[in-house]
Image: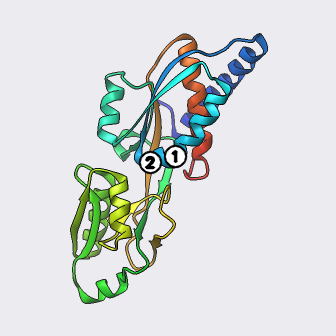
Amino acid sequence: MLTAEGEKLMSYARRLLALNDETLRALQGERLTGEIHLGMQEDFGESLMPGILGQFKRHHPQVRIVARVDRNGPLRQALAEEVLDLALLWQTEDQGPGMGRCPLAWIAHPDLDIGALLASGEPLPLVMFDSPCLMRSRAIACLDAAGIPWQVVFVSHSLNGIWAAVQAGLGLTIRTRIGMPGNLRTVAGLLPSPGSLAVNLQQTPREGQHSAAVALLGDLMTEALQGWVEM
């Protein structure tokens, strides 16, 4: 079994091999073709996907990408059923270290006075996904450990719904800063740190040219994440 450092070295080795294969294909005039089924969390979909897919399409116009933006559970199920070739997922501790960790933050509208809410002893209003949700569980665990009362005041099935409710001042949420609307702010110091969450890029084993195309797309996604994820 590889250590965390060994997994990183293995990942780098795969990327180098994929880049080497890409160079050879370019020199030989070979064009990648086929179809890639890609899955991505909402957090990454709106912020990272347009740039990644645009760059890949410019270099490999013959490859068709079928993208799916969904929550963790459905994406993992699709991977298990080999419906997806590649998926960017949140990962729990028992599922391994992943490719890196993404810092989490309490996020609220500037007009929501967190200090006053805490001083009043009233339950902290939370805007969350419905269960099961890793970030919802993290938020509740943090507040319970600190003895801070809370109440879920808004439940959404989509990230857009979460952002809309927080922008309306209904409550605060725990998310990453990826795709955070500009009129919101992170809350630090007043609340317990939510820590970070592991993220992983999982690939369904394939063979031949299709595998090469998936590996190259994975490389682009890894590079795009470097500014957001602590590798």
What residue lies at 46% left-to-right and 40% top-to-bottom?
200
Using the rendered image of the protein, determine whether residue 125 is visible from the camera's viewpoint: yes
Mark with earlier residue (2, 1): 1
Residue holding disc 2: 198
**Could you say which quadrant of the image residue 25 lies in?**
top right
Q: Is 188 left or right of 55, judged from the image as shown?
A: left
**Residue 107 location (% of width, % of height):** 41, 68
What residue lies at 38% left-to-right and 69% top-to-bottom?
167
Q: From the viewer's side, name the closer residue of 41 and 202.
A: 41
**Residue 166 location (% of width, % of height):** 35, 67
Q: Are dots 2 and 1 in contact, CB under 8 Å?
A: yes
Q: Is 44 left or right of 5, judged from the image as shown?
A: left
Residue holding disc 1: 100
Within 10 angstroms of label 1, few (less than 14), some, or many (20 or more) residues? many
CA gap, disc 2 to disc 1?
Answer: 6 Å
Q: How is the image coloured?
A: rainbow
Kind of residue indicated by mark 2:
Ala
Using the rendered image of the protein, determine whether residue 11 is visible from the camera's viewpoint: no
**Could you say which quadrant of the image residue 209 lies in?**
top right
Q: Is 22 left or right of 192, judged from the image as shown?
A: right
Within 10 angstroms of label 2, few (less than 14), some, or many (20 or more) residues? many
- Judged from the image, the secondary structure of the residue bearing numbered disc 2 is strand
